[in-house]
Image (cartoon, grey):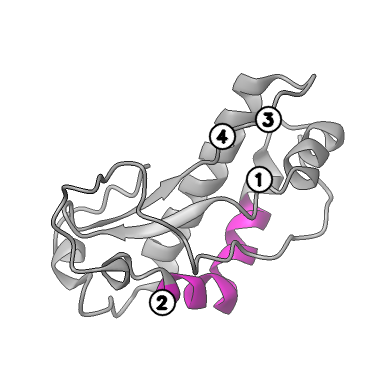
Amino acid sequence: MALDVEVPNPPDLTNRGVPDDFDATDELGGPNEFHRAELEDVLRDGAWQEAFHEWAAYTDLTDEEYRVLHDHGLLEELDFYWDPAEGRLRFEVPPLPATEADESLLRAELNDLAHTVVEMIEDAYWEGAPHWATEAFEEEPTGDG
């Protein structure tokens, strides 16, 4: 089933905390180590729109289920970041609010969208990978969250 909806704005990746997979004891060089500002630029340069169109063409969500994601701001809460420990692009899906919609379906579709975004960035937008990602792209990219 394909969704026929307008592409929402890409997530704002600035002013985000440390991703859940990290804790206060992890030695990080600071928030810039996650390269969210650079990733946000890539999303705004077209990666978000292209990935969203690709995902919308194959999603199992109905228009009503999509509206749950949209109206609760869950698309804007998707988080994309560079994982300096693993040397790869990662994502986090926000917690879902209690709704009458199928929570497992919503979570799966948010994961699919985020995975599609990561693949779009890796395949189409990082042809000349940034210096902080060069080593990762010499290996096989994994991209899953």
Please name which of the two marks, 3 or 2, marks the residue nearer to the observer: 3
Q: Which residue is mark 2?
A: 38
Residue 98, compared with residue 7, is above or below; it is: above
Q: Earlier in the sequence, mark 1 or mark 3?
A: 1
Q: Which residue is mark 1?
A: 74
In the image, taking residue 112 as reference, residue 89 lies left or right, namely left
Residue drawn where x is 76% and y is 46% of the image: 70
Q: Which residues are magenta?
A: 37-54
Please name which of the two marks, 1 or 3, marks the residue nearer to the observer: 3
Q: Which residue is mark 3?
A: 97
Q: Earlier in the sequence, mark 4 or mark 2?
A: 2
Q: Give the residue type at disc 3.
A: Pro
The local crowd at label 3, few if under 14, some if 14 to 19, many if 20 or more residues have their Cα within 10 Å, is few
Could you tell me residue 93's position as x and y percent?
51, 41
Q: Residue 95's mark? A: 4
Spatial CA distance of label 4 from label 2 is: 25 Å
In the image, taking residue 132 as reference, residue 122 lies left or right, namely right
